[in-house]
Image (cartoon, rainbow, N blue to C red):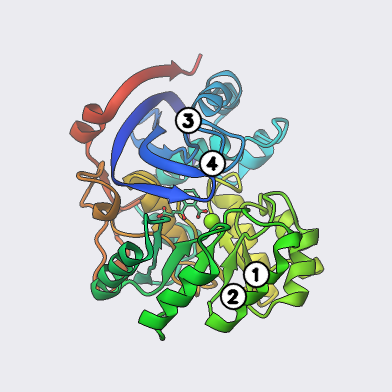
């Protein structure tokens, strides 16, 4: 069964976050992103969501660079020939360097469509075995420690299985100490988003006493070598986020000892095909993985849930409830978290229906591209 894409609609959406999300590299107040709808010859729609932000802070991609890559390079390649399997797209897009988030957005739409054509949920097509997934929550930098403790308390009460706090120089050891004093036993981790260098090794060593599950991406976004040096000198397991763009990166990180855990984000690695490859490689090497987040709306969130059903996603990820981010999400039903778990949907494809009325209400601009 081949998929013949007749048209693709790119929509530029803008959604306001319920509360600002502050990281070491900047603060997000609202979310602009591209929603991809790929429609085949039978009129079936597959959905993908680009996780590129408005600003090139997390990585070099943005909403505009993604639109450019999709319009001028990726969609023409998609229209060139039918797709028998979504895995083919990696090869088809391989002449285009990097731009992983743009590639992942369109690949995600084809994965959804591929699963829908077989009347199967995406998680089954990927080979996932779970009917529910455990999730944690990522908490931005707050205006003071009291506020942070209040926020953590709320999410612990709600049942989230792991709390992640963001750290940066000036908001790290003392803050973690206070959190641990108040919550001695919660599964806790810290994400630095590349805010440190090896010169800060004493600060990073000082975190060893707090039994963090891991420290995420302490050093530079493209680094593997210094992380290996750091890991030899601290007890807290290092988890890499920004440094891992491919299975090749993961192989090198494992070989060098740069990390003990990997955060997998579908967008950062160019799509579900590469994400699964990283998952498999980590599994074969005894490295647990978990699913990161990019403040996704419903479509991206649904893809994350499907991926997290794979066996080696053994640690709770950042896929919090829709209502954690949005007044109203773009899928029906919204993603809900009960006792720190999400029930994996069994409907075909991503398992949630796209709420076209909500999509329209958040839409800034749209353009339709047709196969010749
Ligand atoms: O580093 O994981 C990150 C949000 C934006 C950019 C980078 C990151 C994050 C998060 C939030 O930590 C995860 C989420 O709740 O979606
Ligand atoms: Mg991170």
Q: Is residue 115 visible?
A: no
Determine whether label 2 and label 4 are within 8 Å by CB.
Answer: no
- Reading the image, the residue beneath label 2 is 207
Taking depth in this image into account, of 185 and 148 the one nearest to the observer is 148
* Residue 76 lies in quadrant: top right
- Reading the image, the residue beneath label 1 is 204
Q: Is residue 7 above or below residue 349?
A: above
Disc 1, SS: helix
Determine whether label 1 and label 4 are within 8 Å by CB.
Answer: no
**Residue, far bottom:** 185
**Residue, far top:** 372
Taking depth in this image into account, of 250 and 211 the one nearest to the observer is 211
The crowding category of the residue bearing disc 3, from other C-alpha atoms within 10 Å (few below 14, some 14 to 19, many at least 20), is some
Distance, label 1 to label 4, CA atoms, is 33 Å
Disc 2, SS: helix
Disc 3, SS: loop
Residue at the spot x=41%, y=55% of the render? 140
- Reading the image, the residue beneath label 3 is 4
Image x and y of residue 14, in percent:
33, 31
Image x and y of residue 7, in percent:
42, 23
Of tags 2 and 3, which is closer to the observer?
2
């Amino acid at each position: 069964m081949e998929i013949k894409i007749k048209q693709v609609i790119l929509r530029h959406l803008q959604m306001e976050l319920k509360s600002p999300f502050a990281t070491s590299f900047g603060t997000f107040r609202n979310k602009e992103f591209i929603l991809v709808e790929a429609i085949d010859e039978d009129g079936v729609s597959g959905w993908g969501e680009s996780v590129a932000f408005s600003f090139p802070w997390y990585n070099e991609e943005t909403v505009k660079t993604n639109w450019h890559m999709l319009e001028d390079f990726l969609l023409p390649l998609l229209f060139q020939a039918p797709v028998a399997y979504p895995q083919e797209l990696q090869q088809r897009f391989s002449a285009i360097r990097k731009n992983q988030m743009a590639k992942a957005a369109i690949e995600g739409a084809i994965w959804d469509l591929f699963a829908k054509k077989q009347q199967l949920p995406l998680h089954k097509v990927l080979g996932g075995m779970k009917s529910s997934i455990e999730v944690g929550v990522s908490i931005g930098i707050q205006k003071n420690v009291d506020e942070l403790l209040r926020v953590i308390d709320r999410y612990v009460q709600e049942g989230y299985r792991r709390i992640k706090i963001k750290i940066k120089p000036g908001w790290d050891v003392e803050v973690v100490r206070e959190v641990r004093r108040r919550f001695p036993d919660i599964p806790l981790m810290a994400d630095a988003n590349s805010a440190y260098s090896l010169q800060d090794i004493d600060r990073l060593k000082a975190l060893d006493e707090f039994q963090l599950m891991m420290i995420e991406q302490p050093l530079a976004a493209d680094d593997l070598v210094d992380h290996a040096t750091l890991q030899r000198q601290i007890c807290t397991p290092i988890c890499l986020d920004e440094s891992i763009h491919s299975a090749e990166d993961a192989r090198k990180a494992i070989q060098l000892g740069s990390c003990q855990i990997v955060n997998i984000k579908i967008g950062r690695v160019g799509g579900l095909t590469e994400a699964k490859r990283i998952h498999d490689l980590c599994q074969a090497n005894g490295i647990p993985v978990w699913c990161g987040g990019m403040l996704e709306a419903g479509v991206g969130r649904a893809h994350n849930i499907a991926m997290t059903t794979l066996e080696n996603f053994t640690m709770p990820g950042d896929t919090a409830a829709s209502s954690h981010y949005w007044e109203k999400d773009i899928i029906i039903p919204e993603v809900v978290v009960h006792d720190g778990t999400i029930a994996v949907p069994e409907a075909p494809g991503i398992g949630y229906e796209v709420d076209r009325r909500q999509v329209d209400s958040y839409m800034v601009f749209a353009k339709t591209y047709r196969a010749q």
